[in-house]
Amino acid sequence: MSARRRGVLRNDLAAVARIVRAGGVVGYAVEACFGLGCDPRNTTAVRRLLRIKRRPAAKGLIVLAHDAKALRPYTKDLPAQARATWPGPHTWLVDANPRLSASVRGHHREVAVRVTAHRQAARLARLCGGVLISTSANRARERPARTHRELCRRMGRGLDAVLVGRIGRLARPTPIRDARTGRLVRA
């Protein structure tokens, strides 16, 4: 059965946000590819996302936001150098709030955060309470999905919805920098 017939493919941003708020796992467009997302406050949803992606929990995930204020509960501090690059395709490792679930930060003291300039992703995050998990829509050793159709074909059965949309203009996933040192962690 195709993802379209199962009702996974959605055009309605508000409906996809309701699915996320209810504990669902969704696919959506970001700067360079499609991403998988869920509510970072919902540990069950985060664990389900990790299973779908087949990603080790130890690695951690990105928390994507529509504005920097929405990231406050997830971090100890947001350094000025990070805030100066937002909104934009820049992900920063910052000291995590100690109460942040290990399912989000992995086995790290830091959490990866980004305030996106991708309009649809930012609107989705805002409708989901300000934040959303963001990890590339692929499994280990696969390239990330770059269209909603490709995502539905590859992973649609495991997802609650895939939001129809277009990726941004980046050719590669957003760079990740360590906010303490400025060191490039992922190019």
Image (cartoon, rainbow, N blue to C red):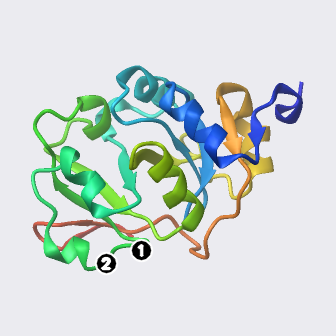
| Label 2 element class | loop
The answer, for residue 158, to whether it is visible in the render is yes
The answer, for residue 32, to whether it is visible in the render is no
Q: What's the residue at 65%, 38% (across, down)?
A: 15
Q: Quadrant of the N terminus?
A: top right
Q: Are marks 1 and 2 in contact (CB under 8 Å)?
A: yes
Position above or below: 32 against 139: below
Check disc 2 and report the residue beneath it. 85
Query: Measured from the top left, where is residue 90 in percent x and y?
Result: 37, 70
Q: What's the residue at 35%, 31% (across, down)?
A: 57
Query: Measured from the top left, where is residue 24 in percent x and y?
Result: 55, 28
Query: Measured from the top left, where is residue 140 in percent x and y?
Result: 53, 41
Q: Quadrant of the C terminus?
A: bottom left
Q: Amino acid at mark 2?
A: Thr
Residues 35 and 140: in front is: 35
| Label 1 element class | loop
Q: What's the residue at 59%, 31% (across, down)?
A: 19
Give the left or right position of residue 178, taking residue 65 as reference.
left
Residue 88 badge: 1
Residues 130 and 103: in front is: 130
Answer with the quarter of the image where residue 47 lies. Answer: top left
Position above or below: 81 against 15: below
Disc 1 from disc 2: Cα separation: 6 Å
Query: Measured from the top left, where is residue 35 in percent x and y?
Result: 56, 50
Q: Amino acid at mark 1?
A: Gly
Please tell me how crowded label 1 is: few (under 14), some (14-19), or many (20+) other residues with Cα within 10 Å.
some
Residue 72 badge: none
